[in-house]
Image (cartoon, rainbow, N blue to C red):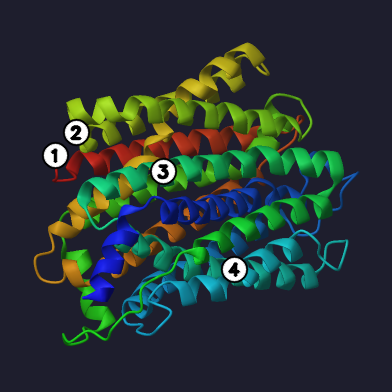
Amino acid sequence: MILSSLKQVYSKTKIPWLFYVTGFFGVFLINSGLTSILLYRYDPGSNAEQLPVLVPAAIVGAAFFISRAIGAILQPVAGYLSDQTYGRWGKRRPYLAASILPVVGSFVLLFNPLINETSRGNNFYLISFLCLFYFALALYQVPYLAWLYELAPEDHQRIVLSSWLAISSLLGVTLGSVGTPWLSDRYGFTTMTWVIGGISFAALLLPLANSELASEKATTQRLPLLTMLEASWQNASFRPYALGISAALTALSILAVCPPFLAVALLHKDIGFGALINALVLGGSACSIVILKPAVKRFGKKRVCQFSMLWSGFGLLLLTITSVLLGPSLPLWFLLLPLTSLGLGCILVLPNAMMPDVIDQDAQFGQYAQAVYFGSRGLFKELSAGFGILIAGFLLSFGNSEAQPLGAQLSLMTAGLFAFVSAFFWMIYPISK
């Protein structure tokens, strides 16, 4: 009776929400900071005279894919373990607490390798700490997202809190993808890692200030992880949902690592200009959040996702054609980048709002497997994000400089094609609302 009363009081106050949403800010800040500049850190392309090539771009892309694949496999496992954890500290907080230091520590170490030249040692160093980073990030993300259902037990509360998470993630992506290239160009990689790492550490730590009620052991029979994963895949709504997100995130991952090379190869600027490219992309994405709510109310989440991906796909192909035919036309880029990014913003907002719809379609295990569904989605998301960086690393090996821009142009075009693939999966997604 007392625990029930405490839970009602706790769920009605908004203070836990303020602490909670900072975690998503920290996740997106440190992850976008890593993806936006790490490839350039290890293979600076045309700036190789000023910065040494530590690891070739194709190998960096492969390292990203391998490490994110390992993190992807861990995601459903982390969700399952979190759901099955019982004790005075709750189900979610122990996993968050254990993962923060490895996430931030590996981020700092990745940008400060011990060997300042191309070597096999750097290959091993890169893959080892990338694996640690994504292993620890998965251990944080899945229990963190599953915690939302306790903090916001009512449906309308979850919609509001999901909107807060979207804003928090967008702020994190903005600071990470814009601030990281700027700090690296102005003050060097070491200073950048301490600034971004320090802010992320504080943001990731704040959710632990929330008191999670002690979890009591469930009286129902524990269901095997593979049984739950199989049930999620057999969910006819989950398959196109997961594949639509995966294709969109592949496109976004390609774009996430390309701004320094787009700046140098296509716009004939220095890497610091990559921060402005990111700002234009994120500015367009932020504007889309404003128009998403009325658009969803009128057309439904499915149609908005489909149209958004088509819009972004055409925009990216148009940018590719512009770079080939007109060269470094800054006015056109300043116009097309934010317009193209209007479609990309939906991926930051709608997937979390659509997940309850998908889980509700699983009549057998849905209510017992919320974290497993988030973990299953995370498996697809991490694999697709790693796949996108793998593709970018391969394509950029065809040319990432002003003299040889082919790789950067191919990266833009490929991102556009994956946006079209995403639109196809949203077209066959069965839930129309």
Query: Which structural element holds mark 1?
Result: loop
* Residue at mark 3 to residue at mark 2: CA–CA distance: 20 Å
Q: Which mark is residue 164?
A: 3
* Residue at mark 1 to residue at mark 3: CA–CA distance: 24 Å
| Tag 3 near tag 2, CB within 8 Å | no
| Tag 2 near tag 1, CB within 8 Å | yes
Q: Is residue 28 above or below residue 279?
A: below
- Kindly identify the residue that appears in the image at 38 percent across and 85 percent down: 87
Nearer-the-camera pick, 396 or 276: 276
Image x and y of residue 383, in percent = 44, 60
Inspect the image, locate mark 2, and give the three-letter code of the amino acid beneath it.
Gly
Which residue is identified by label 4? 100
Q: Quadrant of the C terminus?
A: top left
Inspect the image, locate mark 3, and give the three-letter code of the amino acid beneath it.
Trp
* Residue at mark 4 to residue at mark 2: CA–CA distance: 37 Å
Lower sequence index among marks 1 and 3: 3
Q: Quadrant of the N terminus?
A: bottom left
- Kindly identify the residue that appears in the image at 27 percent across and 48 percent down: 157
Image x and y of residue 124, in percent = 72, 73
Lower sequence index among marks 3 and 4: 4
Q: Residues within 10 Å of mark 1 (few under 14, many from 20)?
A: few
Q: Which mark is residue 300?
A: 2
